[in-house]
Amino acid sequence: MTATRPAPPPFVLEPLPPSPNYAPAEMAERARDFHAQMARRRSVRSFDSRAVQREVIASCLLAAGTAPSGANQQPWFFSVITDADRKRRIRLAAEAEERDFYAGRAPQAWLDALAPLGTDPDKPFLEEAPVLITIFAQKYGLHADGQRVPHYYVPESVGIATGFLIAALHHAGLATLTHTPSPMGFLNALCGRPAAEKPVVLLVVGYPKPGCQVPVQGGVKKPLADIAAWLD
Ligand code: IYR
């Protein structure tokens, strides 16, 4: 059995592509500018139906695919949904779960935490937005002979790739929402993905509806002193 498996690729080194080596002032400005750009990102729940170029989504997915991962196994898969019928089926399945969640499954503390964001079981954006991307975590891989290949640091790797994807879409000028219907196992069947893959985020992508409003609380971010410490 093991003899039929391909040998792992050899360990070979290559030169690191040239580093930009910015002067200190330019580096500081670039870092500040990047923070300012990311700070403009808001989770949007009201989308225009305007289509997004397929090529833009493809580039953003390639950017996500550059993320570091455990043993470089890249244990992620992205299903891109743009057709109205599949979006409708996803909305109906998600709303069925959300109704249970808001009507009793969620503990009061969770509902209290969500109150400043004004979320509810109605998810019209799942039909209105031009693009939905289901992000799957590959719990394990498969050899050609059907044997499982263990994957390492899967949640961490997929979380990093998802962050890259959100940043890439924002950089391209698109709005996003990280939607997490719970449970979201229904997405395997609706996206035609195997049981070895676990859906972790349903990313809603598009243009905000004109006049779109967002909850004030969503834009309140912790100050540096609350999220980091220099131990020097
Ligand atoms: N999945 C529900 C509830 C929800 C949970 C969290 I954590 C959020 O940050 C937002 C919503 C919903 O999408 O409404």
Image (cartoon, grey):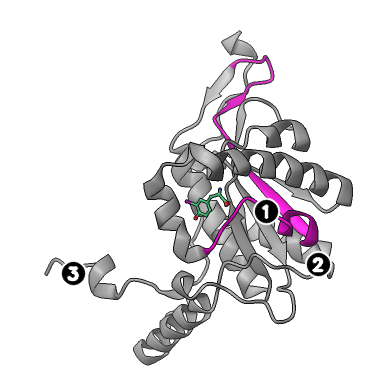
Percent position of residue 47, x then y: 73, 68
- Please, what is the three-letter code of the amino acid marked with disc 2? Val
Q: Are marks 3 and 1 in contact (CB under 8 Å)?
A: no
Point out the tag, 3 or 2, that comes first from the N-terminus.
2
Q: Residue furthest left?
A: 232
* Quadrant of the image occupied by residue 58: bottom right
Q: CA distance from mark 1 to mark 2?
A: 24 Å
* Picture quarter with the C terminus: bottom left
Which secondary structure, mark 2? loop
Label 2 beta carbon within 8 A of ligand 1 = no
The residue that label 2 is drawn on is 52
The residue that label 3 is drawn on is 230
Please tell me how crowded label 2 is: few (under 14), some (14-19), or many (20+) other residues with Cα within 10 Å: some
Q: Residue furthest top?
A: 1
Q: Residue furthest bottom?
A: 25
Residue 136 visible in the current orientation: no
Q: Nearer the viewer, mark 1 or mark 2?
A: 1
What residue range appears in magenta?
118-147
Percent position of residue 205, x then y: 70, 62
Q: Which mark is residue 122?
A: 1
- At 68% from the left and 71% from the top, the residue drawn is 174
16 vs 141, left or right, is left
Which secondary structure, mark 3? loop
Point out the tag, 1 or 2, that comes first from the N-terminus.
2
- At 68% from the left and 73% from the top, the residue drawn is 172
Q: CA distance from mark 3 to mark 2?
A: 42 Å
Point out the tag, 3 or 1, that comes first from the N-terminus.
1
- Please, what is the three-letter code of the amino acid marked with disc 1? Asp
- At 76% from the left and 66% from the top, the residue drawn is 56
Q: Nearer the viewer, residue 151 or 218?
A: 218
* Quadrant of the image occupied by residue 199: top right
